[in-house]
Amino acid sequence: MSAKQNYEGPPPWRSIGRHEMLPEASHDDAARFDFLAQLNHHLGSKVLPGIQRVYEREVEPEQRRRTGAGFRNRHEVRRSLGRHPGYRSWSALRRATMEMRQQAGRMLVLRQWGALNQKAQRLNEAGLGESLLLDPAIETPRYLAAVDHHCMPGSYHAELAPGDVAAAANYDAGIFVTTGGLLGRYSDGGGRGVVDWVREHLPDFRPQRILDIGCGLGHNVLPLARAFPEAEIWAVDQAAPLLRYGHARARALGVRNVRFAQGNAESLASLGFEDGRFDWVQSTMVLHETSHRAMPRMMREIHRLLAPGGITLHIEQPQYHEKMDLCEQCLRDWDAFNNNEPYWTRFHEVDLDAVLVEAGFASGALLHGGVFAPAEDAEAAAAREDGAPRSEDFGRSPAWRLVGARKAAA
Amino acid sequence: MSDPADPAAALADYLRLAGARSKGRRPWFFENRDAERVLGIAMALAQELSVTRDRLDTLERLLEQAGLLRRADIESYAPDAAAAAERGRRTQEYLAVLLRVVQQELEESEAGPEERSSEEVARELGGAEAESQ
Ligand SMILES: C[S@@+](CC[C@H](N)C(=O)[O-])C[C@H]1O[C@@H](n2cnc3c(N)ncnc32)[C@H](O)[C@@H]1O
């Protein structure tokens, strides 16, 4: 068997999809990303199973012995498991990996900061005010301003100077480290998976106007734009650096039917969107970064924006439920407490069906499903069928739950 | 930081900015924070060692492609006596540098009971009043 056949692990960073906006990486920049992707892979596949064994063999039995009953919820598990040296080592290493990943990405981006901003400016020039709509009046909501999400210094929105795209360039170059390439060369596995789901489950759906809220730098909206080339597509986010970079990246990749606009998804009146404007409103890995008050507001706004018969789809990691092992829940919660994802924990126990119904959708019109990042080519598909069960790095696997609804026809 | 789109616009402090902390008080996982700090430094060194190994690997492969060396020769390389002595000496120096802190801690236990710390000597030389001020 060749070395290649034996290999299970992340692909090299150099294999990610290139485009004009992607920052230039030196040999050593790429080697840092490769090391960090391997370190994450190691922590997820070699260390994490050990934590689960510690829970099963020591922590859980100890709780039974002491209290006569098992743990009642994931928070109790966290308090006990959190004292175990193995859990602490895993956590300290995981946190350090996140911080190192940020430094590696920012180092390479800031070294070529001026050139990147200039590239974005040039690619965006023609679209400014047309397909790139920035609105300096949009304020960063408290849930995105209070802590920097997943330890990105400055989060999505901070600008070192007007016109800055550094936050997005860093996100684009470095997301590979946490996903280990499982989202595909263009980190768009979520979007490609949603397109597959829609084709399979809603074969007659012909959306003319699509809105992607919390689009980020557009990783997962471009597959929608490619799948529905005739559609008018709006990609909205609250952070200007992502939109500047995302618009330039879309141009660089030859996608021209997406408008990138700055707005707060809780109320998109600022963009002049009238009631019933859209056939499809999508969010991909966004809701968990909002808040308990904002999320239902976003759902009501989506209901307003949908045309009769229109659909909304949301993809996220699975919600916690009674049958999900408490240790798994606790480990999935890690990012909430240790990686600046503060709404992650509460969000994952929300009854999203109830939120949709509350927002105006009929309980008989809810949509549920599973979405997977499709393999990109025959080689990737073969590698996946190769047997060996994939290790699951909780909260980061390329498989999501889909929740949504169809708005009643008029 | 003048024009953000000026390719020459140097971010003079990009090293500090690259390593800036993220907002949100950091959780520390080890009971002893000093130990976790050292772990952070060790992991950064591990990263840079991995980067260096990748670079060596790249170098070897490129040299082999160019017909300048055979990697199998590296694997089977046996130093002759002179090379072995040079290499052995270098490894010894390396270990001495690496473990200096251990050496010095042990040397201190050999110091006589009359040896004082600089702080103690400062008190002695400055007189008792200096201390009480
Ligand atoms: C984890 S990112 C996901 C980005 C993108 N959907 C993707 O799949 O790559 C979450 C995004 O949601 C955006 N976001 C969160 N709340 C928002 C709001 N109220 N209005 C607009 N954007 C929001 C953030 O700015 C961030 O870019």
Image (spheres, rainbow, N blue to C red):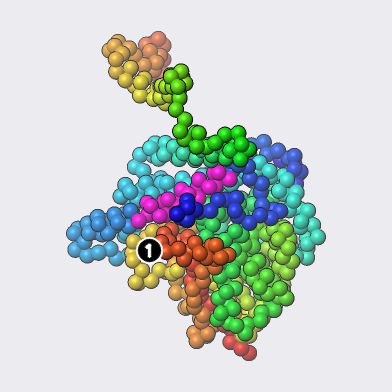
Residue at image coords 76%, 56%: A123
Give the camera-side residue of B53 and A54. B53
Q: Which residues are magenta?
A: A30-49
**Residue at the spot of label 1:** A329
Give x and y (percent) for residue A122.
78, 53
Quadrant into which the N terminus of chain A falls:
bottom left
What is the number of callouts on the image?
1
Question: Residue B7 magenta-drawn?
Answer: no
Residue at image coords 50%, 50%: A37
Which of the 4 image quadrants contains residue A313?
Answer: bottom right
**Overall secondary structure of the magenta stretch?**
helix
Residue at image coords 24%, 55%: A58
Left or right placement of residue A274 versus residue B19 in this view:
right
Left or right placement of residue A158 versus residue A370 in this view:
right
User: Residue A160, relative to residue A18: is it above or below?
Assistant: above
Give the camera-side residue of B7 and A263. B7
Assess disc 1: are there few (<14), some (14-19) or many (≥20) residues with their C-alpha within 10 Å of its C-alpha. Answer: many
Question: Residue A40 magenta-drawn?
Answer: yes
Give x and y (percent) for residue A296.
53, 72
Element under label 1?
A: helix
Quadrant into which the C terminus of chain A falls:
bottom right
Give the camera-side residue of A86 and B31. A86
